[in-house]
Image: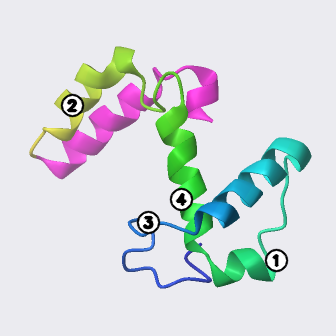
Amino acid sequence: VEQHGVVDGIYRLSGVSSNIQRLRQEFDADRCPDLGKDVYLQDIHCVSSLCKAYFRELPNPLLTYQLYDKFADAVAIQMEEARLVKIKEVLKELPAPHYR
């Protein structure tokens, strides 16, 4: 996405809905769509839009409900080094699929 688009705001802007649906169908059918196709390169926002939709539609967020309070506490730590250590500790508690 960042190689083919204007990075500033690329994850904020929406792609064309027909392109998003086409890309979703390719993922559902092939599991490995060609993101180098002109249709996707010309509307790079459809890639980031589908990515955001994927995370939004997960039944349990990537950073799970169960670990929310621990993540919130970790990011609230003022000292950067201590904050990063705590975040890494909480990440290790994620279920394997979420961690990967």
Helix or strand or loop: what does disc 4 sit on? Answer: helix
Q: Is residue 94 a member of the stretch shown in magenta?
A: yes
Q: Evaluate if marks 1 and 3 touch, with contact meaning CB atoms under 8 Å apart.
A: no
Which residue does the numbered mark 1 point to in the structure image?
Answer: 37
Left or right, 60 with respect to 80, comes to right
Residue at 21% across / 40% down in the picture?
75
Question: Measured from the top left, where is residue 21 in percent x and y?
Answer: 69, 55
Q: Please, what is the three-letter code of the amino acid marked with disc 4?
A: Ser
Residue at 67% across / 63% down in the picture?
18
Query: Of marks 4 and 2, which one's residue comes earlier in the chain?
Result: 4
Query: Of marks 1 and 3, which one's residue comes earlier in the chain?
Result: 3
Cα–Cα span, label 1 and label 3 = 19 Å
Q: Please state which of the two labelled residues, at mark 1 or mark 2, is closer to the viewer.
A: 1
Which residue does the numbered mark 3 point to in the structure image?
Answer: 11
Q: Residues within 10 Å of mark 3 (few under 14, many from 20)?
A: some
Height in image: 85 above or below 12?
above
Instruction: Please identify the quadrant where the C terminus is shown.
Output: top right
Q: Which mark is residue 72?
A: 2
